[in-house]
Amino acid sequence: MCSMISLENCVADHIDFLVNQIGERPGGSPGCLEAEEYILATLAANGWLVERQTFACPDWRDHGSELNLNGRVLEAVVNAYSPSCDVHGQIVPIGTLAELESAELEGRVGVLYGALLPAPLSPKSWFLLSERDRRIILLLEAKKPRALITVQKIGGGVERLIEDWEFTIPSVTVSALVGKEIIGMDHPTLGLKISTTQRPGSTSNILGRSGTSRRRVVICAHHDTKFGTPGACDNASGVATILALSDFLTPEDYPFTLELISFTNEEYLPIGDDEYLRRNGGDDLKDVIACINIDGVGQILAPDSITAISAGQEFETALGHIALEYNDLEWADPWPESNHSTFSFRGVPSVAFTSTNRVALAHHPYDDLSWSSPERIGRLIPVIKQILDLLAENPADWSRYGGGKSL
């Protein structure tokens, strides 16, 4: 059993396996399947009742691309779930939504940059899809370009700017420097070849439960990654926290079931969350006392943060007092982009942990062990135990809006 002294080593071992032994873990990929086996085996070995929730998702493979400009090969990254293509054609640079509205794209290659696409385009079926992104998608599909080149904003590595298996226009992302060169040339001759395969696949949420009572506290993270990143901070750190908790906690100390969930497909539509809801009766989560989500913790150059969403006032106040006890834990504003939203949007009091600088590392190839601090992650575990003890000391509805008074 992990003691307080050995928590750092326990966390380090789990992160090392997920990041160095496996690497990238997109849903449906061999790496994701290997991670799921590892998580399930670890939970079972630590005495938890385990469940595998398997569902369909694409198994997409990137076999490379070649982008030619006037006969010179330029570096490009295939966007996630892009189909294959081999096209030559006129380019149409598009930097604003107004330009997209008026552009003639059919049979051409669109180059999307600047204010039009400063961040990844949301998937069509994402529940947080903005009206602006919806409009961009509808316009692109209606205008029928032969392919798209999306240009990374200045700074950082190249992050894929389209990631949607329902979006069927072939596309790549290029760096800002490459994009500047393409857009700045007069009458360039451009060729783009993309080689990918996609076939039916599957992926699984992995659950560990301390009992069979419907009244439960959920502690969750996600084990999948974007393509091309080993995902140390995002989110081997969260999975390592859950696995260390499975060895550290004493379930008999709590009057409710502890449910440890390692979600899949958080990065490419939250369909792992959808599968969990389907198997738990849909949107009615009244039996969940609270959700604690860990996503992107333990960065060396950034303290961790905690926030509360959909929590009753007494619970949120108590969480604030807990945060004040730890010098390297900051209180943050609520943020929706992770698995806790599945619970908080349905009225479940939710606690979310992340790093204050999480976004700077997330989804990039350099999110590796050199940025991860097992010691810092280990220090979160007693914080989570303190929250569980707080929930155990109060009535089951105390954490919710209008809940019972603290004891």
Image (cartoon, rainbow, N blue to C red):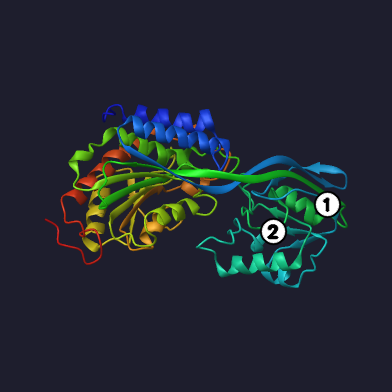
In depth, the one of 289 and 283 nearer the eye is: 283
Q: Nearer the viewer, mark 1 or mark 2?
A: 1
Taking depth in this image into account, of 36 and 144 the one nearest to the observer is 36
- Residue position for label 1: 87
Location of residue 110 with respect to 393 vertically, above or below: below
Label 2: which residue?
113
Q: Residues within 10 Å of mark 1 (few under 14, many from 20)?
A: some
In the displayed structure image, the side of residue 76 where residue 329 appears, left or right: left
Q: Amino acid at mark 2?
A: Tyr
| Disc nearer the start of the sequence (1/2) | 1
Q: Nearer the viewer, residue 200 or 359?
A: 200
Q: Where does residue 168 sit, x and y in percent of width and height?
A: 69, 56
Q: Is residue 162 left or right of residue 230?
A: right
Above-or-below relation of 11 to 158: above
Q: Is residue 373 visible?
A: no
Quadrant in the picture for residue 347: bottom left
Query: What secondary structure is found at the residue carrying circle 1?
Result: strand
The kind of residue tagged 1 is Val
Report x, y in % for residue 107.
Answer: 83, 61
Please tell me whether mark 2 sits on a helix, a strand or a loop.
loop
